[in-house]
């Protein structure tokens, strides 16, 4: 076993200060107002009404956290978002620890922490309790454990690595792809000794045991998650300008300073001889980048690897500085000031414009549904199911159900389509959405009861002609709209 390489002291003070600033900024942005982001209200709805080992498009960990926070502080948005804020701030600390394991001094650790803190998608979404906000700190933990093993060769770290991977799989399934590509990259680039360690495969077994319940749920329910790949690809084409847009945003989401160090770190890992033991990191990043562009994926899919590659770039700047070869010292802090300014502006935009728009939409959906529902005779309400035309509509109805005294919502879309259908005694349906075309064949009468615009309608469907159990599978769809 090679001797343990010494590392610089952890830059605890400045790194924790950066993490604290991130936590406070995300808390201020996330704790204001009374609005849910649609993805997080979806997690809350699953946690409140449908908590299981899985759902059509989500593993169970984030809905579980949402349910726990809602049980501790019912209806509290600040409490709901606390795990997301802590995960976002924690990613800053773990990114700095990655830089330390690579050999980075205090300055390199601070540069890495600063880049992680000002990454654009992290800044934009860092206070929403969603799987894609929890994922980066998990990927960074995996890479930190792996890099620490390379340095100290303590095989107990491989058991911990497996456990973290299993927990990450209960958050988002992309970690399974990360693990596969990492192992392939190590097989090609080294250190191949890792693959000969029994504890690695024991750790993999631990990860598989932790992930098994949600994978079994997927298998029993026909693997709906596999069908999501084509849905995500279609949405990415529409939302981000196709593959070109995804290719660009997968990089620039690292932020101003992060993008510069990301590109430089990739070059260093591929070219510098002293970085050969870590070349598998660049290969992993590039392979995943290519896969997510071709698929295509979402701009945030590589957010958990930014800090790792940035750390390599920061380390090389340190070596150039120590050798007296750097000529760009004057540019570092202005670049970080610009990066912080851009991130801060984006966070303000999120907390005002995006959150306000989301709040207006969710409130309007619930208000329209409540007006129609409470206008029904008392005896009719008990036999009327509340149905949303998409998982977003249904989640908002569930999220604001206490405020507007609404019953549990149903939908055939996304995870809702795999949840149990309405009870059979509910012979009617109050449909909230543009057009109840999917329901029309199963009801003798469908009439418009609220009309406030093309996407702002409520319909009353009466005289159901088929049992819910029979018609429900026909309403299932993973596509929104």
Image (tube, rainbow, N blue to C red):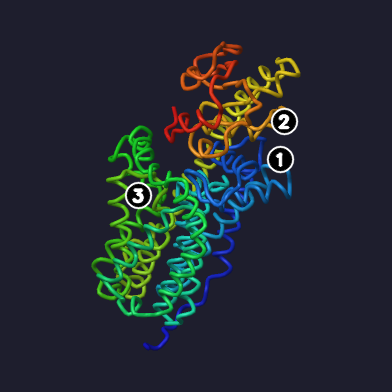
Dot 2 and dot 1 residues touching (CB under 8 Å): yes
Residue 63 circle label = none
Q: Nearer the viewer, residue 64 or 282?
A: 64
Q: Work out how far the residue at label 3 is from the one at label 2, CA to CA, in angstroms.
A: 41 Å
Q: Nearer the viewer, residue 406 or 130?
A: 406
Residue denoted by label 3: 251
Per the image, label 1 sits on a secondary structure element best described as loop
Per the image, label 3 sits on a secondary structure element best described as helix
Q: Work out how far the residue at label 2 is from the one at label 1, CA to CA, in angstroms.
A: 9 Å
Side of 312 relative to 161 (left or right): left
Going from N to C along the chain, the mark reached first, 3 or 1, is: 1
Between label 3 and label 2, give the one nearer the viewer. Answer: 2
Going from N to C along the chain, the mark reached first, 2 or 1, is: 1
- Residue at far right of view: 378
**Is the N terminus in the top left, top right, bottom left or bottom right quadrant?**
bottom left
Residue denoted by label 2: 403
Q: Work out how far the residue at label 3 is from the one at label 1, CA to CA, in angstroms.
A: 36 Å
Per the image, label 2 sits on a secondary structure element best described as helix
Q: Nearer the viewer, residue 296 or 313?
A: 296
Side of 478 relative to 26 (left or right): left
- 454 over 325 or under it: above or below: above
Looking at the image, which residue is at 41% across and 75% down?
200
Looking at the image, which residue is at 48% across and 55% down?
216
The location of residue 443, given as percent across then percent down, is 54, 17
Instruction: Assess disc 1: are there few (<14), some (14-19) or many (≥20) residues with their C-alpha within 10 Å of its C-alpha.
Output: some
Going from N to C along the chain, the mark reached first, 3 or 2, is: 3
Residue 75 circle label = 1
């Amino acid at each position: 076993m090679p001797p343990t390489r010494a590392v610089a002291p952890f830059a605890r003070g400045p790194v924790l200060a950066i993490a604290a600033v991130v936590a406070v900024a995300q808390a201020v942005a996330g704790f204001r107002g009374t609005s849910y982001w649609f993805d997080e209200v979806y997690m809350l709805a699953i946690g409140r009404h449908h908590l299981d080992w899985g759902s059509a498009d989500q593993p169970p960990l984030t809905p579980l956290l949402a349910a726990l926070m809602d049980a501790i502080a019912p209806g509290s948005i600040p409490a709901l978002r606390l795990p997301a804020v802590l995960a976002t701030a924690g990613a800053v600390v773990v990114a700095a620890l990655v830089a330390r394991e690579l050999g980075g001094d205090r300055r390199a650790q601070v540069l890495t922490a600063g880049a992680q803190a000002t990454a654009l998608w992290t800044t934009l979404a860092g206070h929403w309790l969603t799987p894609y906000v929890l994922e980066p700190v998990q990927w960074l933990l995996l890479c930190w454990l792996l890099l620490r093993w390379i340095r100290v060769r303590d095989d107990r770290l491989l058991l911990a690595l497996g456990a973290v991977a299993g927990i990450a799989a209960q958050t988002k399934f992309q970690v399974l792809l990360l693990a596969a590509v990492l192992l392939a990259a190590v097989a090609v680039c080294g250190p191949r000794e890792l693959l000969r360690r029994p504890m690695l495969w024991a750790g993999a077994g631990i990860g598989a045991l932790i992930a098994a319940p949600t994978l079994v749920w997927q298998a029993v329910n026909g693997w709906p998650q596999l069908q999501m790949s084509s849905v995500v690809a279609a949405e990415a084409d529409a939302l981000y300008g196709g593959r070109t847009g995804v290719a660009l945003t997968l990089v620039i989401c690292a932020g101003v300073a992060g993008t510069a160090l990301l590109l430089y770190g990739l070059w260093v890992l591929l070219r510098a001889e002293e970085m050969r033991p870590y070349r598998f990191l660049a290969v992993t990043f590039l392979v995943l980048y290519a896969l997510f562009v071709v698929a295509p994926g979402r701009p945030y899919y590589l957010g958990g690897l930014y800090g790792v590659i940035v750390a390599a770039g920061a380390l090389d700047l340190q070596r150039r500085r120590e050798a007296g070869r750097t000529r760009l010292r004057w540019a570092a802090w202005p670049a970080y000031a610009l990066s912080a300014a851009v991130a801060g502006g984006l966070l303000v935009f999120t907390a005002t414009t995006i959150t306000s728009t989301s709040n207006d939409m969710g409130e309007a959906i619930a208000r329209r549904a409540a007006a129609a529902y409470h206008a029904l005779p008392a005896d009719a309400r008990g036999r009327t199911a509340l149905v949303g035309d998409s998982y977003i509509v249904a989640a908002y109805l569930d999220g604001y159900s206490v405020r507007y005294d609404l019953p549990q919502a149903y939908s055939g879309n996304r995870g809702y389509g795999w949840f149990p259908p309405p009870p059979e005694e509910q012979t009617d349906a109050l449909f909230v959405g543009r057009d109840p075309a999917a329901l029309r064949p199963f009801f003798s009468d469908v009439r418009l009861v609220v009309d406030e615009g093309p996407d702002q309608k409520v319909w009353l469907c009466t005289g159901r002609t088929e049992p819910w159990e029979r018609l429900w599978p026909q309403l299932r769809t993973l596509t929104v709209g």
